[in-house]
Image (cartoon, rainbow, N blue to C red):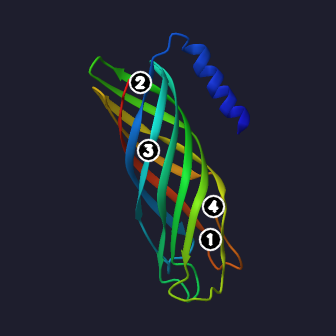
Amino acid sequence: MKKLLFFLAVLCFTGTVKAQFSFGPKIGVNLDQVTTNLNTINDKMKSGLQIGAYVRLGSKVYLQPELLYSTGGVKLSNVPVGSPSDIKLNSIDVPLLLGTKIINLKVVNVRLMAGPVASFMVNKQVDYNGTVDATKEVSIKNANWKAQFGAGIDVLMFTLDVRYSYYLNKPLDQQANEFSWDRNSVNVTLGWKLF
């Protein structure tokens, strides 16, 4: 993964010596979805917030690193008593996206982007189906890798992105588990280009 990040950085900087530079804050919503391997367990989309800043380097092809504080989690129903049913997670996310403008006009442009995201947990809270003692403890990893891809549109100084994120590793490890799960999310953010 380190080689991939280095390659993306070199590619972008060598190709955009006369690159444009923009920077600004952004805010948005996370829509988390968890899927399990058992039909009896119902999963529910849970929303969270995302706030931070981005830097965009390049013109037609660009590199966009970001620093974001994200909230989200997992909501499950019909789980056995003492199993995790509500997990709240707060993290610092660091996406490094490579993008291209497929429509590039003065007032508006349309973009596609993709890249890796390093995610570092800063707060974790687990509710075990309303019980004090857990029959199966959940271990949540402090550092995770995600992949992200999506599209965006810029109108004047505003930038709107819609992205899909999926974990490259399993962030939630359940000991002695009866089921497995995967957590993915849709992110919608609105940014403001300060310059």
From mark 4 to mark 3, how far is it between C-alphas?
19 Å
Type of amino acid under label 3: Arg
Identify the residue position indicated by label 4 in the image: 171
Could you classify mark 3 by the number of other residues whose Cα lies within 10 Å: few (under 14), some (14-19), or many (20 or more)? some
From the viewer's perspective, tell me whether residue 145 is left or right of residue 68.
Answer: right
Residue 184 % position (x, y) = 51, 57
First in sequence, mark 2 or 3: give its number.
2
Are discs 1 and 3 less than 8 Å apart at CB?
no
Q: Is residue 191 above or below residue 139?
A: above
Type of amino acid under label 4: Pro
From mark 1 to mark 2, how far is it between C-alphas?
38 Å
Identify the residue position indicated by label 1 in the image: 180
Circle 1 SS class: loop
Q: Is residue 169 visible?
A: no
The residue drawn where x is 36% and y is 29% is 193
The residue drawn where x is 46% and y is 48% is 164
From mark 4 to mark 2, how far is it between C-alphas?
32 Å
Nearest-to-viewer mark from 4 and 2: 4
Which mark is on residue 137? none
From mark 2 to mark 3, how far is it between C-alphas?
15 Å
From the viewer's perspective, tell me whether residue 109 is left or right of residue 131.
Answer: left
The residue drawn where x is 55% and y is 55% is 91
First in sequence, mark 1 or 4: give its number.
4
Identify the residue position indicated by label 3 in the image: 163
From the viewer's perspective, tell me whether residue 137 is left or right of residue 80.
Answer: right
Which of 158/80 is in front? 158
First in sequence, mark 4 or 2: give its number.
2
